[in-house]
Image: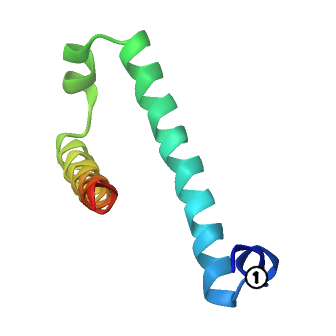
């Protein structure tokens, strides 16, 4: 059975999913690097002072949404591994 799964071709939806996941991993890493650089180069007070406050609040909300989605994935993985 495992050999059959290994040797089968991916369906188009599976290819799209793998592609989207690779893009997501790349973008998460890119965001992480940008934030790490900002934190390393500039004091937090300066970041708050010079940021577009409306845009920064929107960015924070988006990252919060992403974080909650990742937490949901993690909790589901933990739930499935405990069975």
| Residue positioned 20% across, 23% down in the render | 49
Mark 1, other Cα within 10 Å: few <14 / some 14–19 / many ≥20: few
Q: Quadrant of residue 44?
A: top left
Colour scheme: rainbow
- Is label 1 in a helix, a strand or a loop? helix
Residue 61 in percent (x, y) is at 19, 52
Kindly give the residue lying farthest to the front in the view shown.
1
Left or right: 47, with 38 as reference point: left
Task: Note whether 69 is above or below 27 in the view shown.
Answer: below
- Quadrant (top left/top right/bottom left/bottom right) for the N terminus: bottom right
Residue 38 vs 20, above or below: the answer is above
What residue would you read off at disc 1? 4
Q: Nearer the viewer, residue 11 or 1?
A: 1
Q: Is residue 57 left or right of residue 13?
A: left
Q: Quadrant of the C terminus?
A: bottom left
Residue at image position (28%, 49%) is 63
Residue 18: give x, y in percent of width and height.
63, 69
Residue 8 in the image: x percent, y percent?
78, 84
Image height of 41 relative to 60, above or below: above
* Residue at image location 36% in from the left, 17% down from the top: 39
The picture places residue 36, in percent across and down from the top left corner, at 43, 23
């Amino acid at each position: 059975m495992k050999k059959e799964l290994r040797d089968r071709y991916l369906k188009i939806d599976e290819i799209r999913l793998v592609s989207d996941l690779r893009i997501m991993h790349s973008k998460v890493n890119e965001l992480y690097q940008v934030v790490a650089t900002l934190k390393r180069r500039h004091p937090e007070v300066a970041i708050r002072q010079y940021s577009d406050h409306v845009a920064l609040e929107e960015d924070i909300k988006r990252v919060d949404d992403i974080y909650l989605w990742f937490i949901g994935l993690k909790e589901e993985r933990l739930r499935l591994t405990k069975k």
